[in-house]
Image (spheres, rainbow, N blue to C red):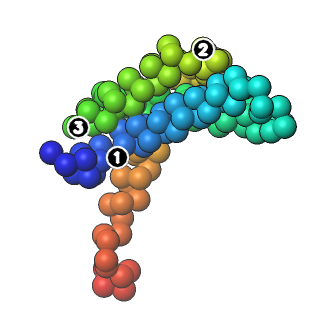
Amino acid sequence: MHLRHMAKGAPIGAASLTALAIVAVCALAFRLLLSSPGTAFLGQWPVSFIIVAYFLFSPAVAYGLYSLLFERHKTLGVAGLAIGLLTVLVVRESVILLDGLLLLPFWFLATMGLVKFLRWRGGRIPANTSEQNL
């Protein structure tokens, strides 16, 4: 099965996988930029990577859980959650990301509301049809 076909069947899982991959890259960049001694001239740039990861991590985990529970293709949600777990286990500095999981029930409810809104909006006006023909 092609990845594009899977992403169409599980758009929330694809979003989760993408966001958690970005979190993993940001956490690794944060660790690499702080571990090398020649990066003192960068100033606050290394901190921006962990801030981006912090704001993306909790909603992405909620998307992954939603995909795992409600979408037909569960592969993308499982892959995203696995990347998130490996990021927290491997990159020592990413333990701070777990603080955001306290709000996981609220993120999960927001995800369910977003999906319901997108389905409602998608059902109102069919694609490639003008409103005059309705």
Q: Amino acid at mark 2?
A: Arg
> Along the line of sight, which residue is nearer the eye, 109 or 42?
42
To which quarter of the image does residue 83 belong?
Answer: top left
Q: Residue furthest bottom?
A: 132
Residue 52 seen in the current view = yes
Q: Residues within 10 Å of mark 1 (few under 14, many from 20)?
A: some
- Residue 67, by quadrant, is top left
Measured Cα–Cα span from mark 2 to mark 3: 31 Å
Task: Pick the quarter of the image with the N terminus.
Answer: top left
Q: Viewer-nearest of labels 2 and 3?
A: 2
Q: Nearer the viewer, mark 1 or mark 2?
A: 2
- Residue 69 x, y percent position in the rendering: 30, 27
Q: Quadrant of residue 37?
A: top right
User: Label 2: which residue?
Assistant: 92
**Could you tell me if residue 23 is visible in this image?**
no
Name the residue: 61% across, 20% down: 94
Q: Mark 2: which secondary structure?
A: helix
Tell me which amino acid carries mark 3: His
Q: x%, y% of residue 85?
A: 45, 19
Q: Is residue 60 left or right of residue 29?
A: left
User: Could you say which disc has been placed on residue 73 in the image?
Assistant: 3
Q: Is residue 16 left or right of residue 41?
A: left
Q: Quickly name the residue at label 1.
A: 11
User: In what element is the residue under mark 1?
Assistant: helix
